[in-house]
Each structure stands twice: as structure tokens, then as C-alpha cells.
Amino acid sequence: MASVTFDHVYKRFGDVIAVNDLNIQIADKEFLVLVGPSGCGKTTALRCLAGLEDISEGRILIGDQVVNDVAPKDRDIAMVFQSYALYPHMSVFDNMAFGLRLRKTPRDEIKRRVEKAAQILGIEHLLDRKPRQLSGGQRQRVAVGRAIVREPKVFLFDEPLSNLDAKLRVETRANISKLHQQLQTTFIYVTHDQVEAMTMATRIAVINKGILQQIDTPQTLYDRPDNLFVAGFIGSPAMNFFSATLRKDDGKLYVDGGSFSVLIPENRTSVYMPYAGKQVIFGVRPEDIHNPEFAPPGIVAQPVNSKVDVTELMGNEIFVYLKTGDHSFVARVDPRSRYRINDEVQMVFNMDNMHIFDKETELAIR
């Protein structure tokens, strides 16, 4: 088992900086997820750790060993790729055993490791099949099994669920989380799907344009995003943002969005008072916008008049897309709500969970 450290790591492709001064310390047995939009540098960072890309500057450590110049095969890591990369002419057993045979592992040890990995993944009955006889989820488990038999210090996953359908993605996501608990090994997982990140990670590192934006537990990223990008990326549907001005009136502070004005809770006024009269970005998550009839008790609720644009019934909730003035936003409301397109409605914002960002720096104001 081992910790992993990115120490001021840069990766350049010509004039393009794919990874920009990346500093992350990943603890032994941690499940860290690197998340961000396509092209943000997360997969490049993973490939640098695997030794598939040479870094331009900095150091990468596995445990206490600097591995900058260590060959990929000697880094004691195993990687699961987005494509399953199985040999079509080999059985499941032979695919899983292939790497061990290259290392001249004894035959009995190969059998023990493959059967143990197959049992963990629930594919022991598939060992004699060829990849063409497997479903997508089964192929993915074989690819994971091929990594498990290596018994590496660190597991690397590069968007392993991208090729699976929605139902299978949820099932495999849970299986990978269980696998981490069973193996008690360091997992580093790359995805652009923030739902995967939120449900699986011990910590999440959010990356944009090669730069680490924030690294913390899933709940902290959700509750206390450091900047506008993290706030908009974490959460589904994404946080609503409104261009607004902080307006002081009779000792109270309001978020003035032009077509609406909401009172900032008294216990948070002192934080935002220095920004009175300035333009800001006001953020509120869809789950903090309620139908007044079904608003949770005890919240600081502020009314906003709006017009229904679109509704999406999800079964256990309704997504309501609304407009107020020039602002469009989405709310997740109680399924008992009865909204129709073009209805003039009043929604309430839960101001206990609001967010305000500096318009120039895009940093959260706290």
C-alpha cells in the first residue's frame, strides 16, 4: 500500500500547459477522484502518474520513492482504461492472467490470484468464456480483475464506466466502492461525471484548464465551494447563478437581481456588508428553491415571482425551469406540485444555503 504525491507537477505539450503546478497529497488507502470537464488535464495527470507521459517539471512520489524516471512496469500500479482492452482470442482467465505470466509468476499463484479476483467481482462462472460472449458490464469487471491480480500499491481508473448504460453504471459504481473497501488500497479515479465523484470519493480534486480548483470531501465541495467553477460543476442540476447587486437598505442587506430582491439572513449580513453597492454573482442550488406549499419548516425563505418555462416530472421530484426578468433558473420541487407551462408562480429561495461570489475574481465571499 502507498501514498501518492504530486509535487508542483507540470505537463506541457508544446505551448499548451495540460497540467499546471499540480500539488496533491493522496493518503494511503484513500479513494481520490479527479473530476473536471473534458480536456481539463485530469487524464493527463493520471497518465503522468502511470508513467505513460513524462512530466515537464516537478516530482511524482509513490510512497517515499520519486518515480519520475521509473519505468511504468516498475511503479507497482495497475490501470483500468475507458476501453476494456481485452484480448478477443483469450478466455477471461487468460486475459486476467496475462500480466502475471509476463512476470513469470508461478502457475499455482496465478490460479490463486485469478480465482480470488473473480470471486470478489462475481465473475468466477465466466472464466472460460471469450470477451465476445460477455456483456459490457462483465467485460468491465474482467478489466478490473486484470488489475486486481497484480496486487498493486495503487489502482488507477480512467473513466471506466463511460461505455456502460445508465443502469449498469450505477451498479458498477457501487461495485467499485465495495472493491475499495475490500482491497484497502489507494484508488485514484478519473471522471467527468460529478455524480460518480460525489458517490464514490473519499476526497474530490476539481480541475479546470490544468489547474487544481479545490480538493476536499464531497460534502464540503457541495456546501462550501471555493469559487464559481466548483459551485457550478458540483451538483446536478447545476447551481443557478444570477448577476445581482448587494443593496443596503435601513441596515439590512438585499440581493437585488433587478426582477427580484431577496433579504440576506441577519446572521450573514456582516460577511457581505463590505460588498454593499457592488455587483456580485448570487448562487442558489435547485434543491434550495421550493414550492411555498411544500417548503421545509424552519428555513429562511424569500419569495421570488417567476414564470414556468418547462417542467420535467422525475417521479420523486419535478424539475421546473423558470424565468424571472432576464434570469432563467431551475428548481427541484415536491412531486405534489402542480405547475403548467406559462403559469405565473411564486417560488421561495432558501437563503440559509445561498452563495455569493465576487464578480471579478469569481471567488466565494465568506
Image (cartoon, rainbow, N blue to C red):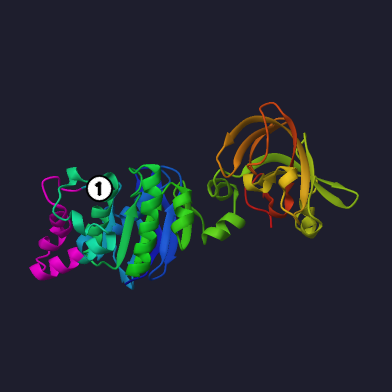
| Amino acid, disc 1 | Tyr
Q: Position of residue 154 (x, y in %)?
A: 31, 65
Rate crowding at label 1 as few (under 14), some (14 to 19) or many (20 or more) other CA atoms within 10 Å.
some
Q: Is residue 95 left or right of residue 167?
A: left
**Which residue is located at x 38 percent, y 69 percent?**
29
Q: Is residue 319 visible?
A: yes
Q: Position of residue 82 (x, y in %)?
A: 30, 47
The magenta stretch is: 86-115
Disc 1, SS: loop
**Which residue is located at x 15 percent, y 60 percent?**
97
Q: Position of residue 19 (x, y in %)?
A: 40, 51
Location of residue 127 by image quarter: bottom left
Residue farthest right in this picture: 250
Q: Is residue 323 above or below residue 301?
A: above
- 218 is within the stretch colored magenta: no
Find disc 1 in the rendering and name its residue. Answer: 84
Q: Position of residue 105 (x, y in %)?
A: 11, 68
Q: Quadrant of the C terminus?
A: bottom right
- 95 is within the stretch colored magenta: yes
Q: Is residue 170 left or right of residue 241?
A: left
Q: Is residue 225 visible?
A: no
